[in-house]
Image (cartoon, rainbow, N blue to C red):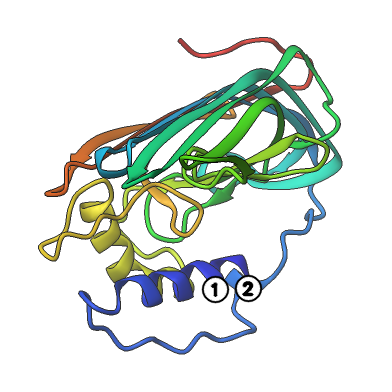
Amino acid sequence: MFRLFIATSLTLLLLACVPAAEKPVDEESPAEQPSEPSTEQAKPITVHARFHYVEQISNPSIGNDKSLEATFQLESDIQRTGSFDTAQYHHENYVNRAQGSVLASGTMDLSDHDVSTHETYQMQGKWPNLAEQSPGRFAIELPEQSDIGEGLRIEFDIKAPVTGTKKATIRSKDQALESTVTHARPLMCIDGEAGSDWCNIHFIIDAIPTTAKTEIGAAMLPHAKEVYLLQGKKTEKGGLIIYGDMLPVYGATTRYQDDHFITNLSVSYNASFDDGSRISQQLDVVVWSTERGSNWQPD
């Protein structure tokens, strides 16, 4: 059903600029069946990732700047049946390990007549040792063969708790009131409890859209090609398709070394708008598999 969600999201987000009739999908098609180990002996492997994400947003009209940076080494123990581009991947005990950090910061200074608003946001989380982490979630989901191109589709789900300082003050001539931070908090972070916040960093990386591999892929392919061309670029109407959790980030390449895969994605952009606001994003990911217990990694 995940693939069906992506196909629906693509249709909704691109309906205004890419008219296309949605194709019916056979619910009994192989693409809709859950991944189950075959009678072939499943091989225990580890999937590793180097993950780096940077986001910066500036809006001078309200004196607002905010940024988010996440750097992680991730590992998940899973099982594999098959090999190369026919391999399937299966959960074992769903063990995830992470090492890394998240830094979220921002400010806002806005004055209007006799009233001014000042916001400060400086939150971070650090996980110095590669281990299972709690609280939070630091997961590489099961790799899947792409529906729309050569290679793999891989999902990252990071829910990182952060702590630090967040403060908002509204001042007038006679008084100062404490308020809630709204503009200084990065887009991917949300309010938590007891002074903490959560930064929810969720991405799906997928192959370059070239050829439909499944029935779902045939329905997705035209939209995926359009998104691939537009992601990180302003449209004719002034819109922008950012990297986020609503759509896959296309352009990942996969190669194989022995029985193991190496998937790379490196994308970035810097966009400015007529009102002086700016946004930039950078996503660099390397994902690879090894024998269980191996520390090998690509350059």
Instruction: Note whether 171 is above or below 30 in the view shown.
Output: above
Relative horizontal placement of residue 144, taking residue 36 as reference (left or right) = left
Q: Is residue 14 above or below residue 91?
A: below
Residue 17 image position (x, y, % from top left) = 20, 74
Task: Name, please, the residue furthest toward the front.
Answer: 174
The quarter of the displayed image where residue 219 is located: bottom left
Counting residues from the start of the chain, the first of labels 1 and 2 encountered is: 1
Q: CA distance from mark 1 to mark 2?
A: 8 Å
Query: Amino acid type of disc 2?
Result: Glu
Task: Indicate the position of residue 244 as horizontal and vertical percent values.
Answer: 45, 49
Q: Is residue 129 above or below residue 250?
A: above
The circle on residue 32 is 2
Can residue 254 be seen here? The reply is no
Q: Position of residue 13 (x, y in %)?
A: 36, 71
Q: Residue at x 85, y 41 (%)?
A: 92
Amino acid carrying mark 1 in the image: Leu
Q: Residue at x 39, y 69 (%)?
A: 10
Let me know if residue 106 appears in the view: yes
Q: Could you classify mark 1 by the number of other residues whose Cα lies within 10 Å: few (under 14), some (14-19), or many (20 or more)?
A: some
> Residue at position x 59%, y 79% from top?
29
The kind of secondary structure element at disc 2 is helix
Q: Which mark is residue 4?
A: 1
Residue contact at pointers 1 and 2, CB within 8 angstroms: yes
- Residue 98: x and y in percent read 72, 23
Quadrant, the C terminus: top left
Depth check: give the residue in front, 90 or 168.
168
